[in-house]
Image (tube, grey):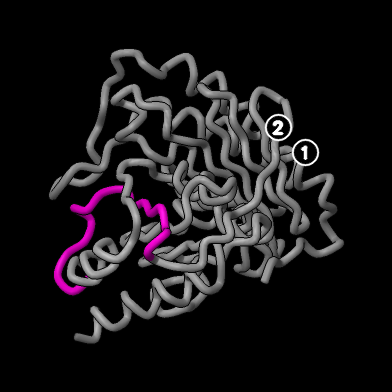
Amino acid sequence: MTISAPSTLSEAKITETLLASAAAARPVTLERFRTQLVVDNKDHGGFDPVTEADREAEIAIRRIIGERHPDHGIVGEEWDAKAGTSPYCWVIDPIDGTRAFISGVPVWGTLIGLTHEGRAVAGLMEQPFTGEYWLAAGGKLQHGRNGIPAPATASTVTKLELARTSTTSPDMFEGREHAAWTALKDRVQVVRYGLDCYAYCLLATGQIDLVVEVGLKDVDITPLIPIIEAAGGVITTWDGGRAEMGGSCVAAATPELHEQALAVLGAAMAG
């Protein structure tokens, strides 16, 4: 069920903040995209890249939010959380898909979401290089390219065998999760890798039917929840719970498809 933002913060103000924040981050990311950036690794046991573009874009977004909503909390990918005195909290991933960003592939995006008492109520994904945006507030979804609106609704696919499916990488699955992913991918029509947040937004416009991932952070998924729900899709954790805290998540175009995916994943995990 789509959760609309409470009346104490209007849909118009939420939308204005999301758009202003994305506009502040846009030049920061665009001027650095497809340049020879210094890439730092945040994961000494693996590879979790971060660049100046990530850090500076989040600073730009935080500045806008702080000016407009000084009592709100902020949780971001690159900087420490800011505690607030309000039940609202903004959730930021300035460049979701940094691997794509440093490789020059335009499937990364700027994610900005809003929660109220822990529930996602609004979210935005902007891909500034292609000019695309998806914005959900008040249970309604706006989508377009270069300011021109376009339709946005999830597909009507209800069967796994017809599902166009995505996950960021098969390497993210280990142990029983790998067995579960294998069981699922062997049932679906086609699988595409490497799309990060872009896959969820393609689900919201009917090109992808199912997205299955593990190891997500709250900043990776919270801004996308209102977008998927406003498009008519369903998103939960693998055990059917709310997805705001990340972890193992499933997004589907229809309740029927979501139920089938959970059943396959659950059976493989239990086996």
Residue lying at 41% horizontally and 19% vertically, measured from the top left: 33
The percent position of residue 252, horizontal first and vertical second, equals 49, 63
Image mark for residue 20: 2
What's the amino acid at mark 1?
Answer: Glu
Residue 171 sits inside the magenta stretch: yes
Left/right placement of residue 209 relative to residue 191 reads right
Residue 43 x/y as whole percent: 21, 46
**Pointer 1: what residue?**
16
In the depicted structure, whether residue 142 falls above or below residue 164: above
**249 and 94: which is toward the camera:** 249
- Side of 204 where 39 appears, left or right: left
In the image, residue 252 sits, relative to residue 27, either above or below, namely below
| Separation (CA) of disc 2 from disc 1 | 6 Å
Name the residue rendered at 46%, 41% in the picture.
Answer: 198
In the image shown, does 51 or 163 lie closer to the viewer?
A: 163
The residue lying toward the viewer, choosing from 26 and 159, is 159
Confirm or deny contact between disc 2 and disc 1 (CB under 8 A): yes
Q: Residue at x 32, y 81 (%)?
A: 266
From which residue to which does the magenta span run?
161-177
Q: Is residue 201 left or right of residue 5?
A: left
